[in-house]
Amino acid sequence: MALARFVVGHESMIRRLERQRAEGRIAHAYLFTGPPQVGRRTLAWAWGMALLCREADPPCGSCRSCRRMQAGHHPDAFLIAPEGSSLKIDQVREAQRLLAHTPVEGPYRILVFDQAQEMTTEAANALLKTLEEPPSYAVLMLIAPSPESLLPTVVSRCQIFPLEPLPVPVVRRALQERWDLPQDQADRLARLSGGRIGWAVQAAQDPEILSAYEERIQRIHMLLTQGRAGRFAFAEMMADEDEEARSAFLEAAMAWWRDVLILASGADLPLTHEEDRPTLQEVAGRVGFTGARAALEATRRTWLALQRNANARLALEAMFLDWPEPTGEHI
Ligand SMILES: [Zn+2]
């Protein structure tokens, strides 16, 4: 399990990859799916590092090839990410030119396409040609939220590795052992991460990420005291934000309502927002299990609808109608 030294969690995916390597069945195309920041790109890059490392139990992490991979300038491995808002046909053509050359050092030439769902149709069709007839040394890796976010013809050429959010204890242990965070900080970030190790590590390094999260929770508190006018004004404002900001808010709201639901149901489960227990308890007492469940379902529905490009303002307005009414004195 040498890959596990470079990737947190995802053991069954690692076992699958290492079995392929042991049996010499390396695929020409992989698709790593899952939510952002669960470790898809880290796993893809570590797999590339393993394929190019010549040591006995790759990736060793210390040979010249591994060191160049880690620094991001191995002559046989390339990361292709969207330029601006999309992954364009010129980028795919450039990638194809890179693949036209045989490997400089290792046995493979590796191309990792980050956010492959942002590929334009022309780019995807161009890539399809390479996927249909890849050079013997080519290994392509695509990273996307789900197979549905790509053309079916592209997906059908790839081996799919679905990555799930990690269990919170796995994130907590990794933050303590690999990133040397103190226990209380590791515990809090692991809970708030929802199993996305990449988020937790970034939040540990950049205090603004945590304060942005805290602002979202404050915003939820405020919305709960506001009537329709205040909530709809917020929906209008959010409609002008980018997709990332909207899903970040909705994900925080889902986790928050889940906490309310846990408290309303009396279940003995850990809370994501343990620090917010007094407010959560108050809301759980007021809206009850049914109210909490309705709010959580409405929030989740909206999050899904916005992933399918629904009208953001209308979807958010509909969601707020399903959130509990504010208490009397605030209307
Ligand atoms: Zn190595």
Image: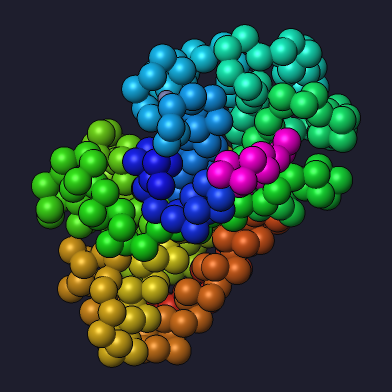
Q: How many marks?
A: 0
Q: Is residue 247 visible from the viewing direction of this image?
A: no
Instruction: Quadrant for residue 190, please give it.
Output: bottom left
Instruction: Quadrant for residue 26, please give it.
Output: top right
- Nearest the viewer among 22 and 79 is 22
**Residue at screen point 81% across, 49% down:** 156
Q: Is residue 108 visible from the viewing direction of this image?
A: yes
Give coordinates of residue 72: x percent, y percent. 47, 18
Residue 210 is left or right of residue 288, and the answer is left
Image: 10 above or below 5: below
- Nearest the viewer among 240 and 306 is 306
Image: 4 above or below 115: below
Give coordinates of residue 199: x percent, y percent. 37, 44
Q: Which residues are magenta?
A: 20-33
Residue 243 is left or right of residue 29, and the answer is left
Image: 177 above or below 46: below
**Residue at screen point 44% across, 84% down:** 291
**Residue at screen point 52% across, 36% down:** 47
Is-magenta flag for residue 154? Answer: no
- Image quadrant, ligand 1: top left
| Quadrant location, the C terminus | bottom left
Indicate the colouring scheme: rainbow
